[in-house]
Image (cartoon, rainbow, N blue to C red):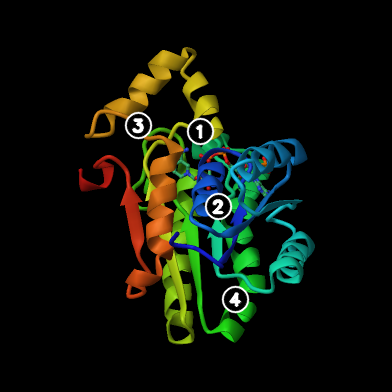
Amino acid sequence: MKLKGKTAIITGGGTGIGKATARLFAREGANVVITGRTEETLLETADEISGAGAEISCRVSDVSSESDCIKTVESTLGKYGRIDILFNNAGVCYKSNTHETDTDMWDETFDVNVKGVYLMSKHTVPHMIRQGDGSIVNNSSILGLKASPAGFAAYSASKGAVNQLTRSMALEYADKGIRVNAVCPGTIYTPMMDELFEEWGNRDLGEKRYISVHPIGRLAQPEEIAYAVLYLCDDRIKFITGTMLSVDGGMSAK
Ligand SMILES: NC(=O)c1ccc[n+]([C@@H]2O[C@H](COP(=O)([O-])OP(=O)(O)OC[C@H]3O[C@@H](n4cnc5c(N)ncnc54)[C@H](OP(=O)(O)O)[C@@H]3O)[C@@H](O)[C@H]2O)c1
């Protein structure tokens, strides 16, 4: 059990990559707190995972709200006394060319994908500094490293910002025992992608288009990202900080 005795907060933990990571972390012995805006999916996930005997709590919380983030951090500390891991995973993705992106869509993308990472980190870091130890992993994207011609400018810009925030925070807290890394997934089968596949008018066609840009010739399941997040949180490789770990079937090598 790599995470025995540790406490992890996973934002957006009710679905997709967050859910797979919550399941893996619980199996590895962590107390896991999952957050999101939809109580139903959080409760379903908590129910499913706690069935395996792990300690899991859920909290309805919007990462773009500072008061929600403060309450999430305080309630986690109240319950478990410490926060060892913060997985800033919550995110939204809209497909739209820049001139057709309405301002609300742009603002939501940055409020959730960037401000959410900042707010959760801002309120968690003081406790990690006190502990002298902690690991923050941000869920970025391959589109934070490379541009896409397919109408993801706002999303790509937000994930580029996440990468720079990750590098900057890694340097700010390197001497405090806090490691800050990002995982940069290619295309993963999650509810977020279900919607994007459908935008091609036909799910199979959409899926094939995404597969075609991954040299490995397939997309990935959320568990593959969960294992990458676990790797970044592993105490045996504490020399890793400020890294953008691509898990993308070879996309970034092109
Ligand atoms: N799937 C991919 O191919 C892929 C590739 C690269 C990166 N990623 C990144 O992976 C992360 C997880 O996405 P996913 O693919 O697993 O899709 P997903 O299943 O749609 O997960 C997104 C999660 O974020 C939560 N969320 C959204 N807005 C929120 C907010 N304001 N406050 C709190 N939680 C919020 C959602 O829950 P609620 O709606 O209930 O709040 C949901 O649980 C995202 O950051 C995404 O950008 C995904």
Which residue is painted at 58% across and 82% down in the image? 131
The span from disc 3 to disc 1 (Cα, nearest Å) is: 11 Å
Mark 2 or mark 4: which comes first in sequence? 2
Q: Earlier in the sequence, mark 2 or mark 3?
A: 2
Q: Residues within 10 Å of mark 4 (few under 14, many from 20)?
A: many
The residue carrying mark 1 has its beta carbon less than 8 Å from ligand 1: yes
What residue sits right under mark 2 in the picture?
Answer: 26
Q: Quadrant of residue 123?
A: bottom right
Find the distance from the CA under tag 1 to the CA under tag 4. Answer: 29 Å
Q: How many residues crowd around disc 2 within 10 Å: few (fewer than 14), some, or many (20 or more)?
A: many
Provide residue 155's location: percent of width, then percent of height.
50, 45
| CA distance separating discs 2 and 1 | 20 Å
Report the residue marked by disc 4.
125
Report x, y in % for residue 32: 62, 56
* Label 2, ligand 1: CB separation under 8 Å: no
Mark before the other along the chain sequence, 2 or 1: 2
Name the N-terminal-most of marks 3 and 1. 1
Amino acid at pointer 1? Thr
Kindly indicate whether the residue at mark 3 contacts the one at mark 2 (C-beta within 8 angstroms).
no
For label 3, the crowd category at 10 Å Cα-Cα, with few meaning under 14, some 14 to 19 and many 20 or more, is: many
Q: Which residue is mark 1?
A: 190
Secondary structure category for the residue under label 4:
helix
Marks 2 and 3: which is nearer the front? 2
Q: Answer yes or no: disc 4 within 8 Å of ligand 1.
A: no
